[in-house]
Image (cartoon, rainbow, N blue to C red):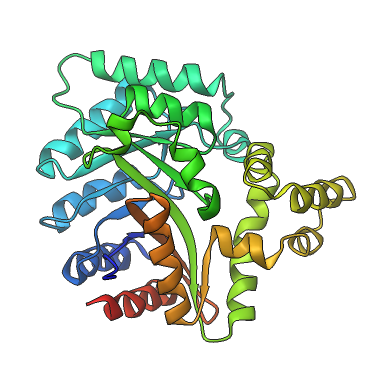
C-alpha cells in the first residue's frame, strides 16, 4: 500500500513566527496534504500569513476556541482568510478546555448548544462574505453527531486508533462517505531511533490531557478503564506528572500517538488511514531539540513517502 502524505501541525510561538511561515512554505513544497494550527498562539493570525505565503496547500485551524472572541469577529476573520486564500481555508472551531478558559478569564457554557449557536450565528452574519467550510473539534459521540449535522468536517486531537471505527459509526453514511467531509486527527509524533525515549516524549505531551475529565471519559470508552482508574488515583494523591505518566501503558500510548524509528512511525500512520481518518495531522515533538528540530524530523520522515 502506498501511504499518502499526511498533514502537519504548525504553531507560531514568539520568536519563531517568521521561521514557522518559512516552514509552511516548505510544507507546501514537500507535498503535505495540509497545515493545521492548534489554538496555541494566534492561529487566525498565522492562517492569514499562510494564506499570503502559500499558493495551493489546504490549511486550517484545529481549533479556534469560540469563547475568546465574539462570533461576528471570528466569522469576519474566517471569511477574510477564506477569500484571500482562494478557498483553501478550513475553519476549525471548538470550546477548548478549562485551563485555557481560566487563562482567558471566560466562562464556558454548554458545549453542544454553544457550538450549534456559533455556527448558526456565523452563517446568518450579514456583509462578511462567504464563510469557509467549518470543522468541529470532536472527541465523544454527541459532538461527532453534531458535526455530521451542522458542519463540513470534524477533527480529533489525541484520538484512539483502535476506537476510531466505532466513533465514526456515529456519522450519517452520506457524511462518512463524502470525500469533501473532513475527518482529521491531531497525532503527537516523535521520530527517534530509541523507541523508549520517544515514548517518554509523547507520554509527557499527553499527561496534561489526562487531567481533563472529558478526555479520561473518552479513553474509558476506548477501552482504557484500568489506565484511567490509575490516573484518577494519581490525581487524587496530588497529581504528580511523573506518577500520572507511569499510569499510561505503552499500549495506550501506541494507540494515541506515533513514536519511534521512522519505519514504525510510518506503519502507525498507515493504520490511522485504515481506521477511517482521512487526514492524519502529525504534531511534531523531538527527543533531541525544540519545535523547529521536531518539524525538521517530520519533514525527513515524510520524505520517505515520495
Name the residue: 78% across, 65% down. Answer: 246
Name the residue: 65% across, 64% down. Answer: 251
- Identify the image quadrant of the C terminus: bottom left
The front one of 122 and 179 is 179
Residue 11 visible in rendering: no
Residue 286 visible in rendering: yes
132 to the left or right of 108: left
Name the residue: 45% across, 31% down. Answer: 170
213 to the left or right of 68: right
- Identify the image quadrant of the N terminus: bottom left
Q: Among all residues in the image, which is located at the extreme bottom?
A: 193
Q: Is residue 226 above or below residue 287?
A: above
Q: Among all residues in the image, which is located at the extreme right?
A: 237
68 to the left or right of 131: right
Residue 66 % position (x, y): 43, 29
Name the residue: 43% across, 62% down. Answer: 271
Residue 41 % position (x, y): 43, 50
Residue 158 % position (x, y): 53, 52
Q: Is residue 269 above or below residue 58?
A: below
Tag count? 0
Residue 141 % position (x, y): 52, 31
Amino acid at each position: 500500500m502506498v501511504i499518502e502524505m499526511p498533514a502537519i501541525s504548525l504553531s507560531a510561538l514568539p520568536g519563531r513566527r517568521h521561521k514557522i511561515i518559512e516552514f509552511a512554505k516548505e510544507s507546501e513544497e514537500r507535498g503535505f496534504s495540509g497545515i493545521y494550527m492548534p489554538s496555541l498562539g494566534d492561529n487566525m493570525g498565522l492562517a492569514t500569513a499562510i494564506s499570503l505565503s502559500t499558493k495551493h496547500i489546504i490549511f486550517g485551524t484545529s481549533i479556534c476556541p469560540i469563547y475568546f472572541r465574539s462570533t461576528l469577529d471570528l466569522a469576519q476573520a474566517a471569511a477574510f482568510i477564506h477569500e484571500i486564500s482562494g478557498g483553501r481555508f478550513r475553519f476549525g472551531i471548538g470550546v477548548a478546555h478549562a485551563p485555557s478558559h481560566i487563562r482567558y478569564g471566560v466562562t464556558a457554557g454548554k458545549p453542544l448548544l454553544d457550538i450549534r449557536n456559533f455556527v448558526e450565528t456565523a452563517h446568518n452574519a450579514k456583509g462578511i462574505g462567504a464563510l469557509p467550510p467549518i470543522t468541529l473539534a470532536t472527541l465523544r459521540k454527541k459532538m461527532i453527531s453534531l458535526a455530521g449535522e451542522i458542519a463540513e468536517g470534524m477533527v480529533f486531537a489525541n484520538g484512539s486508533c483502535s476506537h476510531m471505527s466505532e466513533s465514526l459509526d456515529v456519522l450519517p453514511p452520506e457524511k462518512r462517505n463524502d470525500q469533501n467531509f473532513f475527518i482529521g486527527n491531531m497525532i503527537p509524533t516523535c521520530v527517534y531511533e530509541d523507541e523508549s525515549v520517544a515514548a517518554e516524549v509523547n507520554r509527557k505531551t499527553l499527561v496534561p490531557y489526562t487531567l481533563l475529565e472529558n478526555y479520561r471519559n473518552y479513553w474509558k470508552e476506548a477501552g482504557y478503564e484500568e489506565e484511567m482508574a490509575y490516573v484518577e488515583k494519581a490525581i487524587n494523591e496530588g497529581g504528580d506528572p511523573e506518577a500520572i505518566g507511569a499510569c499510561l501503558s505503552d499500549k495506550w500510548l501506541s494507540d494515541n500517538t506515533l513514536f519511534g524509528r521512522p519505519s514504525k512511525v510510518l506503519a502507525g500512520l498507515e493504520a490511522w488511514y485504515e481506521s477511517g481518518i482521512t487526514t492524519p495531522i502529525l504534531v511534531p515533538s523531538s527527543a533531541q531539540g525544540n519545535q523547529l528540530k521536531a518539524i525538521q524530523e517530520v519533514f525527513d520522515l515524510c520524505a520517505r513517502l515520495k
